[in-house]
Image: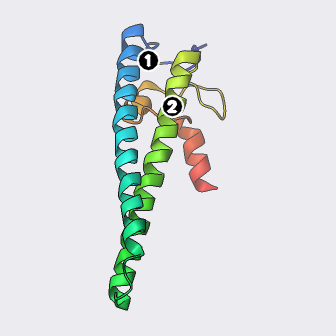
């Protein structure tokens, strides 16, 4: 019977491999936090400048609204990735990294190497996408 988080044809995560993943996730967290701070600052600037548009025509107002919404979407994405990163780091600390949150089976190294924030095995992810 394979160990939790390990497929039958692969070796368990070594401490070095987990440390490498953890280091990558920590670097991602720092990058995402900086990106989020910059984006939120840009949004604040856009909101502050939007009050100055008394003489703007409809196209200018629409352009400002589009730009603000685009920045908000980028910030939401960065927040989501930051949350996923923190959850992955928590799973490493808890010793549950590589275990599917849905079925409890292994996620597999190849999937986690491609997407270290994965919380579902391939089968559960495919089922989720179909529903």
Q: Looking at the picture, how far across and down is residue 44, in whole percent? A: 41, 59
- Label 2 residue SS: helix
Disc marking residue 10: 1
Decide if residue 77 is on the left or right side of residue 4.
Answer: left
Residue lying at 55% horizontally and 23% vertically, measured from the top left: 91
Q: Which residue position is annotated with label 2?
A: 86
Looking at the rendered structure, the secondary structure element under dot 1 is loop
Instruction: Please rate how many residues cluster around mark 1, counting C-alpha atoms within 10 Å: few if below 14, some from 14 to 19, many from 20.
Output: few
Q: Is residue 97 visible?
A: no
Residue at image coords 40%, 66% = 48
Left or right: where does residue 16 sit relative to residue 93? left
81, above or below 19, in the image? below
Residue visible at 45% across and 19% down in the picture = 9
Residue 104 placement (x, y as % from top left): 65, 27
Decide: is 25 above or below 55.
above
Of 33 and 130, the residue lying toward us: 33
Q: From the image, which quarter does the N terminus lie in?
A: top right
Residue 67 in sight from this viewpoint: yes
């Amino acid at each position: 019977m394979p160990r939790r988080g390990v497929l039958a044809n692969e070796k368990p995560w070594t401490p070095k491999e987990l440390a490498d993943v953890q280091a990558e996730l920590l670097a991602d967290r720092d990058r995402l936090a900086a990106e989020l701070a910059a984006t939120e600052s840009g949004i604040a600037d856009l909101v502050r400048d939007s009050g100055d548009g008394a003489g703007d025509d409809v196209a200018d107002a629409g352009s400002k609204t589009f730009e603000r919404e685009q920045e908000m979407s980028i910030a939401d994405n960065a927040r989501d990735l930051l949350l996923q990163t923190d959850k992955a780091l928590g799973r490493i600390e808890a010793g549950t990294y590589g275990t599917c949150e849905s079925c409890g089976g292994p996620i597999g190294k190849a999937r986690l190497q491609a997407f270290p924030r994965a919380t579902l095995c391939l089968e559960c992810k495919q089922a989720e996408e179909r529903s």
